[in-house]
Image (tube, rainbow, N blue to C red):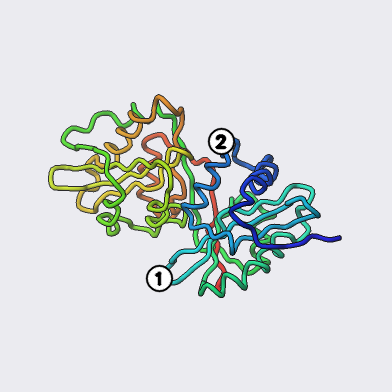
Amino acid sequence: MGIIYDNLSAGMKPRIYSTFVEAFSDYAMDMRYMTEEIVFNRAEKNGVDFNLSVGAFDGEKLVGYTLVGIDTWKGATAAFDITTGIIKPYRGKGIARAMFDRALPGIKKRGAEIFVLEVLRENAPAVKAYTKTGFHVTREFDCYHADIGELSDACGSNDGIEVAPAGKDILARFEGALDRRPSWENSFPSIRRIPDDVLILTADAGKGPAGLLVYYPAINWVMTIAVMKEYRRAGVGTALLARLAGLIGHAVKRVKIMNIDRSDEGLSAFLISLGFEVLVSQYEMEMDL
């Protein structure tokens, strides 16, 4: 009997997670911190719909899966490949393409016009497979990391800027502060869907909110750092990162800032000036449906 493709369900989370662990055991990034709870909280953040998600079964064994999210993207309904994993003995057999083919009718029925995914640039086999499926590269992202102690030293003091926690309702005030469209992972709708703890910091330079930082502790990601245009080069971004370093320095040694649009040279230069280094780079890819 060959591979059977079928839709997944929320009740299959333990099986999906077991396949995730096996599939990502040789991944370019260390994924061992991704517990079952974190995997599925992140999936919820990204708008997961299990009815659109697909598994590949060899008998009773789940050998591959793709979790699909639904949201608005570029003003249209879109689907997102939250995570696709195939265990090593089954790679190179067309399983990823077959799972997408199985998922597409349901995705189109939901009115999706675009399918979006993110993939490591160095994962050449995956990039090739997605290209053959009909995806094309739309943007390049760099993912940074920095030592917390070094970051704290680099930030120094920022007199005159008050940084305080805020709730998710503050996000709407910063839509205009974003020079680039965030990645799906880091979009404001994704931040609003985070089901567990999220740390949101705002900076006030004396006349109201001047900067925003969003940090997701479960995956140790800075998802957003944004400064109102009129407050740039005034120490607002540095003050936000300094406060973050002070709050999480007891818990983590390094912090990540993910999916910085490579074309945003100003933000990239700012991060590098504070000691951030590129951890990995990704392609954003899309397929028109």
Does residue 85 appear to the left or right of 263 in the view shown? right
Does residue 164 appear to the left or right of 196 in the view shown? left
Q: Is residue 113 visible?
A: no
Count every numbered label the image shows and give the total.
Answer: 2
- Location of residue 163 by image quarter: top left
Circles 2 and 1: CB distance less than 8 Å? Answer: no
Query: Picture coordinates of residue 231 (x, y %)?
Result: 21, 48
Q: Is residue 226 visible?
A: yes
Query: What amino acid does circle 2 point to?
Result: Tyr
Which residue corresponds to mark 1?
75
Query: Picture coordinates of residue 287 (x, y %)?
Result: 57, 69
Is the residue marked by circle 1 packed among few (<14), some (14-19), or many (20+) residues within 10 Å? Answer: few
Does residue 90 appear to the left or right of 191 in the view shown? right
Residue drawn at x 30%, y 58% is: 175
Which residue corresponds to mark 2?
33
Residue drawn at x 37%, y 55% is: 188
Query: What amino acid does circle 1 point to?
Result: Gly
Which quarter of the rendering shows the C terminus? bottom right
